Amino acid sequence: MVAEKSSKSLFSVTLRVWRQAGPSAPGRFVDYPAADVNPDMSFLELIDVVNDGLTRQGGEPIAFAHDCREGICGTCSCTINGKPHGPGHGIATCQLYMRTFKAGDVITVEPFRARAFALVKDLVTDRGAFDQIQQAGGFISVRTGAAPDANSIPVAKAAADLAMDAASCIGCGACVAACKNSSAMLFVAAKVSQLGLLPQGQPERDSRVLAMVAKMDELGFGNCTNQYECSAACPKLISHDFIARMNRDYLMASVKATFVPVTNAAGAD
Amino acid sequence: MSLLANLFRSSIGRKFLMAATGLILVGFVAGHLVGNLQIFAHPDKINGYAHFLQSLGPVLWLVRLGLLACVGLHVWAALTLALENTAARGPEAYGVNRWLNAALASRYMKHTGIVVLVFIIYHLAHFTLGAAQAGSFKTALPEYVMTGGFHLLGFPVVAQGQVVHDVYSMVFLGFAHPVVSLCYIVAIALLTLHLLHGVDSMFQTFGLRNQRWATGLRRVVLLFSLAYFLGNLAIPGAMLTGLARPAPGTTAALKLAAAAVSTSAVQR
Amino acid sequence: MAKLDSKVPSGPLADKWRKHKTEIKLVNPANKRKYEIIVVGAGLAGSSAAASLAELGYKVKCFVFHDSPRRAHSIAAQGGINAAKNYQNDGDSVYRLYYDTLKGGDYRAREANVHRLAEVSNSIIDQCAAQGVPFAREYGGLLANRSFGGAQVSRTFYARGQTGQQLLLGAYSALSRMIGAGGVELHPNSEMLDLVVVDGHAKGIIVRNLNTGAISRHAADAVILATGGYGNVFNLSTYARQSNATAIWRAYKRGACFANPCFTQIHPTCIPVSGDYQSKLTLMSESLRNDGRIWVPKKKEDAKKNPASIPEADRDYYLERIYPSFGNLAPRDVSSRAAMRMCEEGRGVGETGLGVYLDFADAIQRLGEPAVRERYGNLFDIYHEITAENAYQTPMRIFPAVHYTMGGLWVDYNLMSNLPGLFVLGEANFSDHGANRLGASALMQGLADGYFVIPYTVGDYLAQQKPGSRPATDRAEFKQADGNVAAMTKHFLDNPGKEPVSHFHKRLGKVMWAGCGMARNKAGLEQALSQIPALREEFWANVRVPGSAETLNQSLEQAGRVADFLELGELMCRDALTREESCGGHFREEHQYPDGECKRDDASFNHAAAWEYQGEGQAPLRNIEPLNYEFTKMSVRSYK
Ligand SMILES: Cc1cc2nc3c(=O)[nH]c(=O)nc-3n(C[C@H](O)[C@H](O)[C@H](O)COP(=O)(O)OP(=O)(O)OC[C@H]3O[C@@H](n4cnc5c(N)ncnc54)[C@H](O)[C@@H]3O)c2cc1C
Ligand code: HEM
Ligand code: HEM
Ligand code: SF4
Ligand code: F3S
Ligand code: FES
């Protein structure tokens, strides 16, 4: 199962995987021994190999989400040994390599758990809630073709860089999975901050944060208690500073929505 | 009024309420500690101070109601948020649970909070209502006659010779019971733990915290909490260990001496 | 025989698009909401199209097999996006961008299309900046540029190493806005499995919900495919694992022509394969070649040695030797083929012998490690993460990998295929890149198609369709397509096979890479053409697809995709075999200059070959769209 010529010393581990046939089926952990693991193999490649073996033996392969396999699409989403995306700092599940483990390890693999991320099967969950939050206000309303010349809106480099830090979120949901309250604050704060930091985002800054937070609450995510588990598990190391920023923005927006006068149409008093 | 709706309904709004009430409560407990430390001075001090506070009348009630509201709001917000948080995890718990980064104190906010709430109730029953240890409650003790005046910020507020409640003796007598003192110490320790995360967390909730000075903030909070703990520990601690004894001639001194005599008589 | 009318407007090159826009038919605003448009795919091309069309008032249904539009493969593009803004004042212009793109494609693209692409490139940057895409900025707050892919001007806009991600998130935000506003109905986890053609027009699709297995029929007034490229036919590539050809392949089988399927781009700087389990090849940015020197040992015996122990005199800096003026910066195809030749000579390095060194020792000596770290630190980190090797101390190992497919469904100037009502955008069409794609131009094309071309050109078609005339989904054509899909699913699940899908995909990949990879020749292609049908037969007889059709079943998804690859691969070989010339990414060993350069045959092959399906077991028909170069002189690409 590995390159014939490999000089690496191969080892064995046990995968303890959460198996659940469907959203309402009961789930449980099942152990799968995996021999001849090459340290250069990625963790997902090991699941590939285990799955091929399962298929050949007439079993059903483990369903798991993945796509780009280079840490950018945000699809992969396993909680490994109690940490979303597994051991390692600032990486997604697909960037985890078997050399991180040692012979004899029992590796527990679970789906991202949160009420707002309904389980689909085995390790796959539905993170459509994130899309709904985006749809509530995670955008700048600009019609195609209506944009002014790009350089007509200068953006201070510091603001642009910070916005980019926030924008690098891959929407994986590890923040929710890691937070003991299943709070989506880090994800929402990243988007709110990205757009709120840029001059283009100012006109809708208040309505955006109000709408996105309202949607987040509605979808049944938990509430932040400032524990910073999220940023520690985030594969892009998005800072929880953005949460503080969003808190402030939210309060300001609420105050403004109440006290700042809106224009009256002509004739109104 | 979207501000009110947001404050009371949204997740972030309720966090704000918790932080804002938390801030007021922190202010109170800090001020209360400073007031209480007068116990180590002449009995005139704390008795005069207590009398002054009692004499404020409607203002006192306003402050009390305010504090009550704060505790109420704080606990209500904490409770609703906590319930939502438990539900947010969903039907299945993780098989393996691991903490990555969260401060120890932050993991037990609910627990420490509940203990503090219970303590507050007990404490009110103890020193404000006299329901616990009724025998040594201030109204059950002989009145205290001010030997000097009590000044606050240089203003004379309680005159010499005035007859006031003997809070000084009440506290000494109250803490003469080791069990009571220990309860206070435990409660205070847990309150300190609550503040250790709470005060830091408050800044994050208000949006006033960032990585650049997060470490500095943590240190300040740590120092504050330590000072708060030691200050509070000093009162029951000193009385329990006998480092602090009631001033001679006070009701507390007389009662404690009498009690000592009776216990030694029994022993003999 | 399909009718291939390119519909390129007449008139001077620079006026064509403007003129066309004023001449094509418009749909009455009140009527727009009566038209329903299906958009399959939400990568750069699909999201931008769906959002823009919904803004215009059309009713749009958008289908993606991903769980969210934000996960489309466009997210992975690193380098940047070109535009002719000339913000750097270095002499760039629409014409230059047009010319470079055309030449980069080795003159196998349509002049008018490429010119339009260059024209709208500027609006793309404006659009994206307004959406809040955090492009890199200079200290003055204006947009920064870099030069990329050997261009002589700095015209590439970028957002760190995550340009594709940021552009896609911009388009995704526009799409999200329209979903929120009710203009777009989003269907995630929904894979299109067949195209429905009614009276010769594309009028609907059949979709499987990947989570529930439910099959549904959807009718529309027009169908837009923006489903990306098909490089995964090679199994190992820089593509995301799930990228596939199913949508375009099934449209092909319904009558849409497939143009230039053999045009594949190989990227020279990818991390080499480490073992059989390998699922993915990771791209390392081309920018590494600016400072790294590429070499292999001169002697075969040294190939397995520790590189540090190989003295300078025994190293062959072959790019510098063969292409002295471009050296390590030789174009992607040239550089890739050179590496391949070294490995064929037995001088390839690493455990598999498939790799060459990209050495930074000189750069570190010249600039110091901090400067190198500053420039490439994140790439060195990626390399370390994957290989556990420290590239500051030992040279990186790189190898070429399949990266982009220039071929795709044939489309006219309006981006409509030969099937009326079927539009194809982005990498899925045979596009504006000719036989090779310049760096930073695919992102540009995807967004140009979606934001600035389709909103106009779809109207031209719809204006000729009666509002409300879309067919009901209980028509025979829908039933038949639906039945097809169900039959295929049933076959897979009932098949008493032994081997998992991946087994066949891996084997197909090897056949394709050997026969139709970086360098092709008659014998190799013929061999592949005999191996693929056999493999296909074996696949159908011996594939094992466990599980049921009523839940998420990833084996079933893969089986359908690999079934299509097994057919598409054959067409690619057929196309490569008939194109008796070398051009861009298509290198036929029989047709090269003595120095190993591509030898084009403009007299015989200055055309797009558009293959037309003729039915199961029949040889497809090769149609031709001649490329009439009216405005640009075709020259020989030389990088010596
Ligand atoms: C590693 C890498 C780096 C790159 N870097 C650059 C770069 O720097 N500059 C540049 O210009 N280009 C770059 N490219 C190329 C460029 O990223 C792609 O060509 C481009 O993004 C393709 O966009 P698209 O919208 O056509 O398709 P994709 O982004 O691939 O989107 C396809 C969409 O179609 C959907 N889909 C597919 N099939 C179906 C189906 N059957 N049913 C339903 N939905 C379906 C998918 O869900 C997805 O939403 C790079 C490519 C790679 C692999
Ligand atoms: C060693 C520690 C403490 C001592 C000695 C102490 C002492 C007292 C005394 C003597 C009073 C009554 C004053 C009077 O009615 O005249 C009082 C009231 C009160 N204390 Fe404390 N206290 C201590 C700690 C705390 C703590 C930790 C809290 C809060 C969590 C607290 C909250 C209160 C409150 C709410 C009142 C009622 C004030 C009022 O009457 O409105 N105390 N305390
Ligand atoms: C004197 C009493 C109290 C003080 C001074 C106090 C102070 C604070 C402060 C400052 C915070 C931080 C708010 C924030 O996160 O922004 C906080 C949080 C909290 N408090 Fe209290 N509190 C007190 C009593 C209580 C009580 C009685 C409870 C009862 C259950 C409680 C439960 C909580 C909880 C659960 C949190 C949330 C922790 C978090 O969000 O991080 N507290 N408190
Ligand atoms: S903030 Fe981090 S953890 Fe959360 S979704 Fe974004 S990338 Fe994932
Ligand atoms: S871990 Fe959870 S508590 Fe807040 S800071 Fe992160 S969302
Ligand atoms: S598979 Fe794309 S981030 Fe892991």
Image: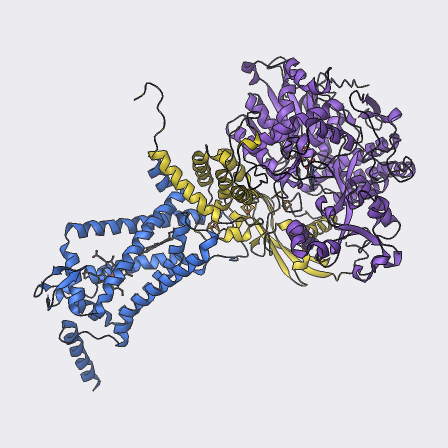
**Chain C appears what colour?**
purple
Going by the image, does A160 lie left or right of B145?
right
Going by the image, does A101 lie left or right of A176?
right
- The relative height of residue C563 versus residue C348 in the rendered view (above or below) is above
Name the spot of residue C259 as percent of width and height, x first.
78, 27
**Chain B appears what colour?**
blue
Q: Residue at coordinates 69% horizontally, 18% vertically from top-left? A: C15
Q: Residue at coordinates 56% horizontally, 24% vertically from top-left? A: C54
Query: On the image, which quarter does residue B148 sit in?
Result: bottom left
**Chain A appears what colour?**
yellow
- Quarter of the image with the N terminus of chain C in it: top right
Residue in front for this viewpoint, A4 or B148: B148
- Quarter of the image with the C terminus of chain C in it: top right
Name the spot of residue C328 as percent of width and height, x first.
78, 46
Name the spot of residue B28 as percent of width and height, x first.
27, 56
Residue in front for this viewpoint, C61 or C149: C149
